[in-house]
Image (cartoon, rainbow, N blue to C red):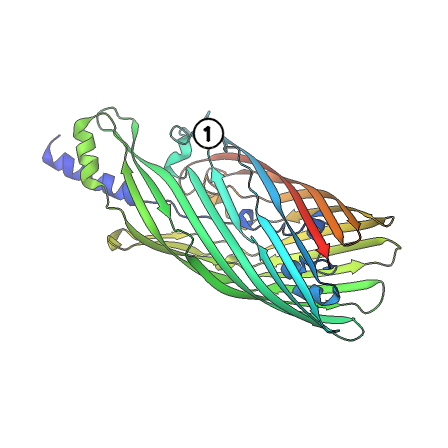
């Protein structure tokens, strides 16, 4: 190639290799399944809050539990996701892709210790947020230049304390949450090969933050039981900002053309430290439960999530600041609606059913391979067995995401329709001393 053409191609390749796609999180990375009984009631648990998982759902609820207890387990989550290209888009028409099959098991564990008549101390370990969009056939999948894999992990440890009045009608609670987080992103970069006029993969870009990223937050709760039939719960978990430090690694992919590979190598940025931040939202939950029917508990909750705190994503390259990235996200606050029923069956069994409708905060133009979020509807069925100090809870939760089309306006010009379903099985084991 002539020197001027080489220079232009070098600049083009350098820019393309730097352009790491922005992280786009939504309701799809909030994990609300942090206890089997609560999950069996569709997550409608802020007013019931009568097992140790109340540390997550409404911390005031541990005050009403007057025996030392432990509870722990996890939720097995599996996703199916299919992408079909837009028939009116010349780039994606006829394209079909799907996720790799994974089983994710976010854990949960709780312990509570009553102190005197009115006070209870507790500690919870849970995973309030998480995301994995890992596409099959990552080196041939058409969306690989936007995202091949996105993996967000969190782990929270929360010491908590709650106090109730002598008559048990009012309880208040407070928790301090320490949250650690880890983000991994991967994609390929491609250019139009000047020799073949086709897109060639020229580099793989990987971002890894490590797990040494953390912040502190808090949550508070109120539980009111004015009489034997009604219960009211209010729970607030504060927003949290985590600053991530990690590494960007650029790995060249040979094209088979020595001249083009030499130009790509010259434009390849150095591996280097990066920084970014994620603004995790606050949640406010209000719940009302009715226990006036013998052996029945019926609860409905509304959850407000402040996803509007996630407006932008900035990725800072410490060695090449001219290539720093700023990408708008423009999330909106959302509401979810939950309904749950618990039915006591004899002395040893409980049966549960629940439902949820969860709005998504993601603008249509942001829907893409990194996160194809959409409104979701779910139904849960659960069983609880308890005998003496022992407890086992099992829940099956089916979650359907409404089909989400990019409507031809995706910011990355990758248009089509996403179809997603998830299945969750939660199991908890408990013991009261």
- Residue 351 position, x and y percent, is 79, 46
Q: Measured from the top left, where is residue 254 in percent x and y?
A: 25, 30
Left or right, 173 with reference to 193: right
Label 1 sits on a secondary structure element that is loop
Q: Nearer the viewer, residue 126 or 17?
A: 126
Q: Which residue is mark 1?
A: 88
Residue most toward the bottom? 166
In the rendered image, residue 123, in percent from the top left (x then y), is placed at 61, 62
Of residues 166 and 313, the one nearer the viewer is: 166
- Which image quarter is the N terminus in? top left
Residue 252 or residue 418, whichever sits in front: 252
Please indicate whether residue 268 sits to the left or right of residue 164 in the image.
left
* Furthest residue in direction right, as rendered: 294
Is 255 rendered above or below residue 269?
Answer: above
Quadrant of the snapshot with the C terminus:
bottom right
Query: What residue is drawn where x is 72% and y is 50%?
Result: 37
187 sits to left or right of 388: left
């Amino acid at each position: 190639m002539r020197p001027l053409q080489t220079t232009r191609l070098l600049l083009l390749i350098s820019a393309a290799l730097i352009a790491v796609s922005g992280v786009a999180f939504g309701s799809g990375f909030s994990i609300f399944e942090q206890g089997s009984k609560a999950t069996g009631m569709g997550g409608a648990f802020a007013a019931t809050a009568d097992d140790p998982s109340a540390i997550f759902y409404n911390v005031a609820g541990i005050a009403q539990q007057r025996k030392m207890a432990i509870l722990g387990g996890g939720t097995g989550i599996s996703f199916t996701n299919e992408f079909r290209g837009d028939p009116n888009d010349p780039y994606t028409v006829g394209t079909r892709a799907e996720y790799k099959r994974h089983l994710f098991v976010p854990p949960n564990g709780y312990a509570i210790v009553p102190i005197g008549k009115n006070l209870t101390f507790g500690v919870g370990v849970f995973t309030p947020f998480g995301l994995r969009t890992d596409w099959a056939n990552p080196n041939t999948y058409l969306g690989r230049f936007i995202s091949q894999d996105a993996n967000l992990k969190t782990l929270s440890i929360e010491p908590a304390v709650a106090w109730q009045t002598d008559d048990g009608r009012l309880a208040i609670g407070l928790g301090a949450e320490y949250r650690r987080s880890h983000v991994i992103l991967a994609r390929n970069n491609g250019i139009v090969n000047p020799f073949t006029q086709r897109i060639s993969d020229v580099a793989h870009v990987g971002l890894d933050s490590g797990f040494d990223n953390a912040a502190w937050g808090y949550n508070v709760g109120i539980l009111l039981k004015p009489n034997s039939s009604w219960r009211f719960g209010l729970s607030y978990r504060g927003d949290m900002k985590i600053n991530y430090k990690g590494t960007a690694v650029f790995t060249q992919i040979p094209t088979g053309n020595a001249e083009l590979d030499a130009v790509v190598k010259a434009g390849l940025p150095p591996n280097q430290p990066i920084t970014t931040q994620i603004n995790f939202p606050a949640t406010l939950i209000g719940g009302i439960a009715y226990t006036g029917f013998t052996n029945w508990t019926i609860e409905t909750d509304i959850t407000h999530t402040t996803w509007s705190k996630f407006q932008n994503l900035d990725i800072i390259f410490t060695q090449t600041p001219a290539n720093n990235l700023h990408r708008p996200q423009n999330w909106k606050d959302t509401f979810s609606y939950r309904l749950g029923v618990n039915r006591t069956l004899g002395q040893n069994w409980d049966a549960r059913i629940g439902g949820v409708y969860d709005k998504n905060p993601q603008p249509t133009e942001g829907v893409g391979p990194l996160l194809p979020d959409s409104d979701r509807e779910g139904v849960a069925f659960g069983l609880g067995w308890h005998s003496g100090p022992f407890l086992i809870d099992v829940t099956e939760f089916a979650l359907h995401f409404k089909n989400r089309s990019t409507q031809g306006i995706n910011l990355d010009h990758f248009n089509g329709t996403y179809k997603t379903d998830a299945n969750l099985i939660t199991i908890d084991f408990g013991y009261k001393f």
